[in-house]
Each structure stands twice: as C-alpha cells, then as structure tokens.
Image (tube, grey):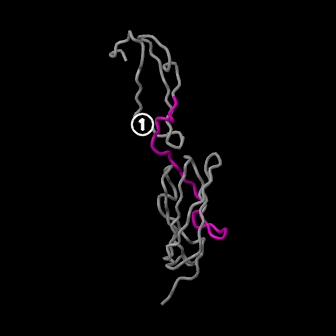
Amino acid sequence: TIHPSFTDTKMSLASGSAYSIATVGLTMAFTVQTRDRFENVRDTRGSAFTAILDGPGGAFINASSLDNLDGKHRLTYRATVSGAYSIKVMTDGVHIQSSPANMSVSATTPNPAAFTAVGPGIVGGTIDQLLYVEVTTRDTFGNYRTEGGDDVRATAVGGGLASPDRF
C-alpha cells in the first residue's frame, strides 16, 4: 500500500462557495483538502489551517478551523460588514493554492428601522406638486443594500384637504 507523503500546504486546495462569496450575518464554511507535494489527496490528520479575512473599513475576521481527521479541514467565519475582502488561508505562514484570494460579502436582509430618507418630499409640498424622497436601505448590521429590488413603500400623511386618489 502506498500512502501520500506529508502535507504540502502549497498544494492544498480550498473549495466551497464561501471561499469567494458570503452573506453578512450567516455562518459561512469552506473546506481545505490537504495534498502532498505530488498533489496526492491526503486522507489523514494534517496540520492546522488558519484563515484571515481583511475587509472594508478595517474589518478583520479570524476563521475557525476544524480538522475532520480525513485530510480535510472545515473553516467557518461570520462577517458583519459587507464589501470586498481578501482571504488568506495558510498553515505555519505558508499559503495554500489560490491564497490570498479576493471575495465579496453581500449585505443581508433589509431592516426598515435602519433606512434613511431625504429630500423635499419629507416635509411640505402642495397639491399637484411633484416632490421626491430618496430612501437609503440598510441591513440589520447597518450595511448599505447595494442590490435593488427591495419593496419600499411610502405613505403620505396629513394635508387634510388632499384626496387619496391624488397620491
């Protein structure tokens, strides 16, 4: 029986979508498959891996690592800031293949309590006058929602002389 040689970190690979994309607030996970210097898959306990995510505004995340004892390591993390990140996966200061890599963390579900609205339509106006309101949507962590499609509705209040069909 021939067994793979010792783990060669430079030949080890990360897999799983959470290595390139993530959503704020969710626990994300990806796998590192250890390999030897000949790129043979290792199937036994290996070295401990670390993953560091550097994000916008100084956001910094250390991922947790679990050795599955089968040559694979499961790394998990949870981001609270959306934006572009750099992810570095290594052991003993040596990067795996394709590390460092770029990744994107998207905002999570909208939180209306965190929305802001500006514009002349907030206060004032007269009948038959077109006014606008600009609404900035945010998620539960205060991140800007950068994708459209949120269902945002406004209700005009006051102006006892206006009729509902005019809005």
Task: State which quarter of the image contains the C terminus.
Answer: top left
- Check disc 1 and give the amino acid type: Asp
Quick check: is 95 in the magenta stretch?
A: yes
Q: Residue 113: x, y in percent?
A: 48, 35
Q: On screen, 27 above or below 132?
A: below
Query: Percent position (x, y) of residue 38?
Result: 56, 78
Q: Residue at x 47, y 39 (%)?
A: 111
Helix, strand or loop status at disc 1: loop
Give the left or right position of residue 56, taking residue 108 as reference: right
Residue 42 is a magenta residue: no
- At which x and y percent is residue 96? 59, 67
Q: In the displayed image of the protein, which residue is found farthest to the left?
A: 165
Instruction: Tell me where the magenta segment starts and ends, as one range.
Output: 89-116
Residue lying at the far bottom in this picture: please name it.
Answer: 1
Residue extending furthest toward the top: 161
84 relative position to 109: left or right: right
Task: Say which residue appears at 53% left-offset and 64% top-offset.
Answer: 75
Q: How many marks can you see?
A: 1
Identify whether 126 is placed above or below 142. Answer: above
Q: Position of residue 69 (x, y in %)?
A: 50, 76
Mark 1 nearby-residue class (10 Å; few <14, some 14–19, many ≥20): few
**Which of these two is toward me, 90 or 119?**
119
Identify which residue is drawn at 52% across, 61% down. Answer: 76
Residue corresponding to mark 1: 150
